[in-house]
Image: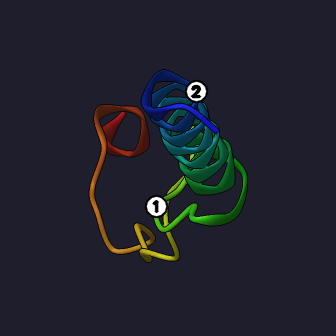
Amino acid sequence: MSFQTLVIILLFVAALCYVGRMLYKSLYTKKGCGSNCKCGVDFSNIDTAKSRS
C-alpha cells in the first residue's frame, strides 16, 4: 500500500467520522425545546392585557 493511498483512506475515514458525528448530534442531542414550547415554565401567575379587560 502506497503512502498516497494510506493518506486518502485516512482522510476518507476522518470525513466519515465528521459526518457521522454531525448526524448523531442533530438526531440525538436535543437538550432544549423546539419552537413554540414553554419548557415546563408555569405562566399562570402572569397578568396579561387580555385578563385586565
Checking the image for residue 5, the label placed there is 2
Along the line of sight, the residue nearer the viewer: 38 or 10: 10
Taking the spot 29% from the left edge, 33% from the top edge, the residue there is: 49
Q: Secondary structure at mark 2?
A: helix
Q: Position of residue 41 (x, y in %)?
A: 42, 74
Taking the spot 56% from the left edge, 54% from the top edge, the residue there is: 25
Residue carrying label 1:
32
Along the line of sight, the residue nearer the viewer: 53 or 10: 10
Q: Position of residue 12 (x, y in %)?
A: 59, 31
Taking the spot 46% from the left edge, 61% from the top edge, the residue there is: 32
Looking at the rendered structure, the kind of residue marked 2 is: Thr
Above/below status of 50 relative to 26: above
Along the line of sight, the residue nearer the viewer: 27 or 51: 27
Q: Which quarter of the figure is the N terminus placed in?
A: top right
Q: Quadrant of residue 36?
A: top right
Q: Residues within 10 Å of mark 2 (few under 14, many from 20)?
A: few
Q: Residues within 10 Å of mark 1 (few under 14, many from 20)?
A: few
